[in-house]
Every structure is written in structure tokens, then in C-alpha cells.
Image (tube, rainbow, N blue to C red):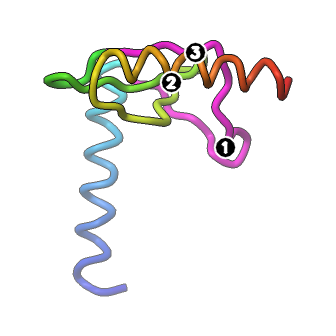
């Protein structure tokens, strides 16, 4: 371990704590590396949207509300076909 490893751990731990304090859920990537619908678009910044799965995981960021809505439709349809 070098001096930067401990800094990386500190930033990771601090970031995780801040995200959880803001209400975000931690997802065990070992158990779930797949997005599960239904999906929804949530505003994220100016003209930006995040596409969120039913477990709260954000998988895609999109510019433009129309693009976000179309992507939600496509992802939901694809998830239904694969289910």
C-alpha cells in the first residue's frame, strides 16, 4: 500500500457515507449487475436526466427530456421481453 491508497479509501468511504446520507441505496453488485424495470427518468442537473431502475440504481445519464422518456420506454420494453 502506498500513500495514495489510504487517500483513495478515505475518499471512497466519505463519498459512500455522503451518498447514503442523501438517501441513495447501496446495491450489492455481486448480486445484481443488471438493471431491473420498470424504469423512470429523474431530472439530474440542467437538461440532464438519470434513468433509474426499480431498485433505485442509476444506470444511464441522458441529455434532454425527450431522449430520457424515449429511453425509458425502450428499456422497459426490452426488460419485459427478456423477463
- Camera-side mark, 2 or 1: 2
Residue drawn where x is 29% and y is 66% of the image: 8
Q: Which residue is mark 1?
A: 33
Residue 76: say if magenta.
no
Residue drawn where x is 25% and y is 56% of the image: 11
Residue drawn where x is 32% and y is 37% of the image: 17
Give the residues drawn in magenta, as a range: 24-42
Q: Earlier in the sequence, mark 1 or mark 3?
A: 1
> Tags 2 and 3 in contact by the CB under 8 Å rule?
yes
Q: Secondary structure at mark 1?
A: loop
The label shown at residue 73 is 3
Q: CA distance from mark 2 to mark 3?
A: 5 Å
Q: Secondary structure at mark 2?
A: helix
Q: Picture quarter containing residue 43?
A: top left
Residue drawn where x is 49% and y is 13% of the image: 40
Q: Which residue is mark 2?
A: 71
- Camera-side mark, 1 or 3: 3
Residue 30: say if magenta.
yes
Amino acid at each position: 500500500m502506498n500513500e495514495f491508497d489510504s487517500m483513495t479509501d478515505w475518499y471512497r468511504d466519505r463519498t459512500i457515507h455522503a451518498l447514503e446520507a442523501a438517501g441513495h441505496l447501496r446495491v450489492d453488485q455481486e448480486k445484481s449487475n443488471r438493471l431491473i424495470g420498470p424504469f423512470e427518468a429523474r431530472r439530474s442537473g440542467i437538461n440532464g436526466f438519470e434513468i433509474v431502475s426499480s431498485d433505485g440504481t442509476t444506470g444511464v445519464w441522458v441529455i434532454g427530456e425527450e431522449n430520457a422518456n424515449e429511453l425509458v420506454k425502450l428499456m422497459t420494453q426490452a426488460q419485459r421481453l427478456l423477463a
